């Protein structure tokens, strides 16, 4: 192995060690301050409700209101089931997640 190859190998080793340290640090930080989970009445739910409620006019609610209401209900389902937002959560209506493979 010539000198440039040795330098590259050493740099790769340092980068690899730094990645391991960063992963350990991020894991440590997550344990100290866990990701906030959805909860009824939290700021996100209030914000979603406010966004939904601006979508009405003198004729009643608009199609956007129903879309945002669905999103708000899904957020509440995550809160009620303590399911993190990055994981699937549903009531099984029209969703194939509950189907068992034959
Ligand atoms: Zn599902």
Image: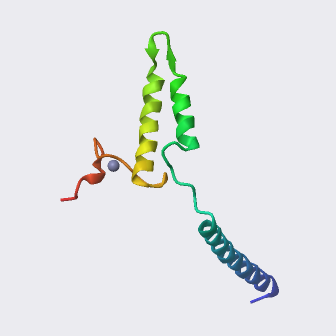
Does 81 sit left or right of 86 as displayed? left
What residue occupies the far top of the structure in this picture? 58
* 93 and 80: which is toward the camera: 80
Please tell me whether residue 66 is drawn above or below residue 45 in the rendered image: above
Quadrant assignment for the N terminus = bottom right
Q: Position of residue 87 (x, y in %)?
A: 44, 55
Q: Residue, x 39% and y 53% (percent of image)?
A: 81
Q: Quadrant of residue 5?
A: bottom right
Colour logic: rainbow
Q: Residue, x 57% and y 55% (percent of image)?
A: 36
Total number of numbered discs in the rendering:
0
What residue occupies the far right of the structure in this picture? 3
Please tell me whether residue 63 is drawn above or below residue 36 in the rendered image: above
Q: Quadrant of residue 82?
A: bottom left
* 51 and 20: which is toward the camera: 51
Q: Residue, x 59% and y 69% (percent of image)?
A: 31
Q: Position of residue 2 (x, y in %)?
A: 78, 88
Q: Position of residue 78 (x, y in %)?
A: 43, 49
């Amino acid at each position: 192995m010539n000198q440039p190859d040795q330098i590259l190998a050493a740099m790769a080793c340092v980068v690899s060690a730094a990645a391991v340290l960063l992963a350990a640090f991020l894991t440590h930080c997550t344990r100290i301050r866990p990701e906030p989970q959805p909860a009824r009445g939290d700021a996100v739910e209030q914000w979603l409700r406010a966004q939904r409620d601006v979508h009405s006019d003198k004729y009643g609610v608009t199609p956007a209101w129903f879309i945002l209401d669905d999103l708000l209900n899904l957020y509440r389902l995550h809160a009620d089931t303590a399911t993190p937002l990055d994981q699937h959560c549903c009531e099984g209506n029209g969703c194939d997640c509950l189907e068992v493979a034959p």
